[in-house]
Amino acid sequence: MIEWKHMDRTKVEAFREKFVGFASGATTIGLLAVADRSGLSAYLGEHESGTAEEIAEGASLEARYTREILSGLAAAGVVEYDADTGVFTLPPEHALFLSSDASPYFMGGWLDMLPLVMSQIEGVATATVHGGGVGFEEFGPGFIKGIDRGNGPSQRVFLIKKWLPAVTGLIDRLDEGIRVADVGCGSGTAAVLIAEAFPNAEVFGFDVSSDSIAVARSRSENLANLEFHDYTVEEIPTEPGFDLITSFDVIHDLADPMAALGHIREALRTAGVYLMMEPDASSYLENNLHDRGALLYGISALHCMTQSLARDGAGLGAAWGTETAERMADEAGFSSFEKLDAITNSFSAFYVLRP
């Protein structure tokens, strides 16, 4: 039995406040998800401010819900509130994350994914006791939408103008025309962008999800230089090979990431390049003891790791980190491994691997 009466009261009170912060963050995500789905966030992004009644009328929403949601978002610091005028304001700096997927900072995909992740807690708890995991399909088709909304905005803004140019000489080769494969292409955003920007290139998108491939094909009907296939990584053809292979937040989710890296190595031509984006983390827990680390381990246990373990996989996890990535690349037969610090950001690390 815990002898709470004799504990350090300062530490007790401090952790109570921390726990309130955890719960507040969870309910704020819920409010933001409602604001996203109801159109409230999009309306505030365009009109910026107004009283609750003005915003409800302008956005065609029910007034009582609108006021309560705005009040919660004001308490969380998402919107600002002027008590003298009753006006709620969404600062443009915050709107970047909430109102439009034209912004590279848009986080709307998380508002699709996190509620679905939380809905599978019972399954993850069962797996924690008995082993196994929760399969990707258990998270539902909404998760595919969330991944697309989560990854698409930054890819549309940065892929062609920033990420690919960070690899020396790559843009010239793409202009000339090379064979490109996007592994784990999802709904096809990156592959479509590359095919549109470099019409001389032959571009292929591969993903195990037939639902994602169906969406990808619907987006690429007018692109003669692009094909999509619902293949596992191991099914990707190694002949005639590829000059550029990309993957964006894929490897850590796979059942057998080591085999996948080895197959990608085999599919690369002699002068080929593999551009891999993964969560930016250290392989050592002591270096990840911060909010972003907590997010990584949380989303990993509740989705990334468990859906791998559901397939009797390695359960590598989202926080596998740079050190492990470099070691596995070496074991897979790559001759060089480089972290592109110029484009690595607070969420994503970019690595260039060569055969």
Image (tube, grey):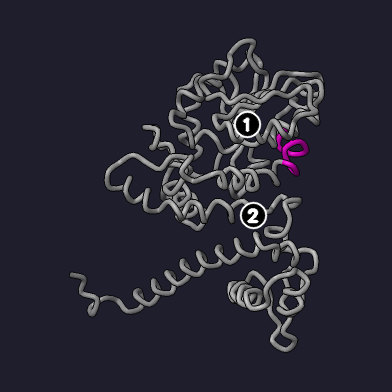
Q: Is residue 281 magenta?
A: no
Going from the N terminus, do you reach mark 2 or mark 1 first? 2
| Above/below status of 107 relative to 80 | above
For this orientation, the residue located farthest to the bottom is: 84
Alpha carbons under labels 2 and 1: distance apart: 22 Å
Of 52 and 346, nearer the camera is 52
| Above/below status of 262 relative to 308 | above
* Front: mark 2 or 1: 1
Q: Which residues are magenta?
A: 156-165
Q: Residues within 10 Å of mark 2 (few under 14, many from 20)?
A: many
Work out which quarter of the rendered image holds the C terminus and state it.
top right
Q: Residue at x 72, y 74 (%)?
A: 56
As drawn, the label of residue 213 is 1
| Residue 264 % position (x, y) | 55, 21
Q: Secondary structure at mark 1?
A: helix
Q: Quadrant of residue 176?
A: top right
Would you say residue 339 is visible in this rendering?
no
Q: Secondary structure at mark 2?
A: helix
Work out which quarter of the rendered image holds the N terminus and state it.
bottom left
Q: Amino acid at mark 1?
A: Ile
As drawn, the label of residue 108 is 2
Would you say residue 217 is visible in this rendering?
yes
Q: How many marks?
A: 2
As drawn, the label of residue 296 is none
Q: Residue at x 69, y 35 (%)?
A: 190
Q: Is residue 160 magenta?
A: yes
| Residue 346 % position (x, y) | 60, 50
Q: Amino acid at mark 2?
A: Gly
User: Predominant secondary structure in magenta?
Assistant: helix
| Above/below status of 207 relative to 32 | above
| Residue 198 % position (x, y) | 80, 26
Q: Residue at x 78, y 71 (%)?
A: 58
